[in-house]
Amino acid sequence: MALEMRQTLSQQMQLVMTPQLQQAIKLLQLSRAELSDVLAQEMIENPTLEDLVDSGREQDAQRLKERGENNPEASGVDGPSMDTAGAKERRDVDNASSADWEQYLGSFSPSGGVAGGSRDHSADDLPSYEATLANKSSLNDHLIWQLRLTGFNAREEGIAALIVGNVDDDGYLQDPLDEMAVREGFDLAVAERVLARLQEFDPVGVCARNLQECLLLQLKQLAGPWDFDVLEAIVTKEIPNLERRNYGAIAKNLKITVEEVHEAARVIAELEPKPGRPFATDDPQYISPDIFIRKVGDDYVVTSNDDGLPKLKISNFYKNVLAQGGATAQTKGYVQDKLKSAIWLIKSIQQRQRTILKVAESIVKFQREFFDKGIAHLKPMVLRDVAEDIGMHESTVSRVTSSKYVHCAQGLLELKYFFNSGINGVDGESLASESVKMKIKQLVSVESRERPLSDQRLVELLKESNIDIARRTVAKYREQLGILSSSRRKNVL
């Protein structure tokens, strides 16, 4: 066969992801905090975007200024002594802008007055402004501060700094000391002596190489009528049995009574397995709801939470640039591109808010009993149920419910919380998996600490409550709830 090149025409359908569509999909799946960051960045990069709130404040200030210039009577220059409301507001703005803040701060006293006057002490006796600021130190800073007070020589201080630099946030030494000695070229015997001194630092148990060493360092600091040899033996040899609360095996292995094991277990339980925990510097992540669901009369009202998000509008200045003419073709082209981008962004945000509201309203319709009576009445529901109800694709509903939160009478919940599988009841009625988890949690909360409920016993109790569930499913839900097995929940006598 001879090879030849020919041109042919064919028709085919395919989805084209335009940049605008990609942006709309991206905005839809963003969380509230991420959306706020994206909008702030867009306002920086696109000069045609303005915040409606800030723009309104500027217009109000401009109107006040024009009112004062055009109305001498209101300004108080030639008019009566009684000020009008507009003139008073304008003077407050002018006074605030013309105040000498540096002089004010320089004469301000932290005790509540102004330095000088009737005070006997001078401003030099007061702490600086920077000294009044609180700054939480990290674990590394805390250890370095103690290191400098220890009296190491230059060689030991260098080794100590390297060791401290390899301590993680939990307070443990990450790299083996012998590997550090080879890598950094220092003497291992000297490093062992330095490490021993570092392990005496605060917090107790810091710079340990493993959990056993961490606990032993803390046990050495304890004062009390306890048998240290028993505590040391349990920590060094019986940690696996201690985790399983197999006190009989510990007593047998160490040739002591079970009562002694119980007493030692109480002491060990009071130790801190992560000594660096108090110095954690992670800031808490606060969640703001995207949707509010409130009951008004017999109905539930779903509203969007727009607080904290910029209310975008198109800048009038750039509208006038195109309308008045006189600008170069390059300038007009730049402004037109930015205006199109701004308009599409505003439409995408509006569409995002409408879609979230639709999904939330559909959830309220399906889960009405949950909002009326609580979690025990949560129904099984999947994404397809809401997608068919509002006429959208399941993938769209999935993006909407990801990292979105609703505030209702039951608390602050993620939208995905309402979508869960069903568990068959004894009478054939389906129950939501979250309702079953709540029931398991309630049963465990009232169990006897000396004889905790096994997974099989939980299955039997759930069946009495009209919930037909397998033991392995109970075990899975128990682990998801962070509940230990019955052997590990058994209380120390």
Image (cartoon, grey):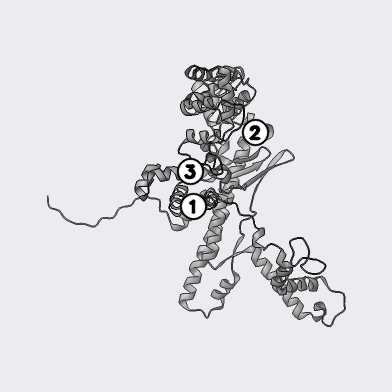
Q: Secondary structure at mark 3?
A: helix
Q: How far apart are labels 2 and 3 at the CA level?
A: 25 Å
Q: Is residue 9 above or below residue 279?
A: below
Circles 3 and 1: CB atoms closer than 8 Å: no
Residue occupying image coordinates x 63% and y 32%: 375
Circles 2 and 3: CB atoms closer than 8 Å: no
Pointer 3 or 1: first along the chain: 1
Amino acid type, residue under disc 3 in the picture: Ser
Count of all numbered marks drawn on residues in the image:
3
Q: Is residue 219 above or below residue 306?
A: above
In the image shown, does 275 or 219 lie closer to the viewer? 219
Of all residues shown, which one is farthest toward the bottom?
78
Say which of marks 3 and 1 sits in front.
Answer: 1
Q: Secondary structure at mark 2?
A: helix
Horizontal and vertical percent for residue 39?
A: 55, 59
At label 1, counting other C-alpha atoms closer than 10 Å, the crowd grade (few under 14, some 14-19, many 20 or more) is few
In the image shown, does 68 or 425 lie closer to the viewer? 68
At label 2, counting other C-alpha atoms closer than 10 Å, the crowd grade (few under 14, some 14-19, many 20 or more) is some
In the rendered view of the protein, which quadrant contains the C terminus?
Answer: top right
- Residue 395's tag is 3
Amino acid type, residue under disc 2 in the picture: Phe
- Residue 407's tag is none
Q: Where is mark 2, residue-wise?
A: 370
Amino acid type, residue under disc 1 in the picture: Lys
Q: Secondary structure at mark 1?
A: helix
Q: Is residue 493 above or below residue 362?
A: above
Residue 232 visible in the shown view: yes
Q: Is residue 304 left or right of residue 326?
A: right
Horizontal and vertical percent for residue 121?
A: 77, 65
Q: Where is mark 1, residue-wise?
A: 26
Examine the image and state in which quarter residue 258 appears: top right
Q: Is residue 52 left or right of residue 186?
A: right
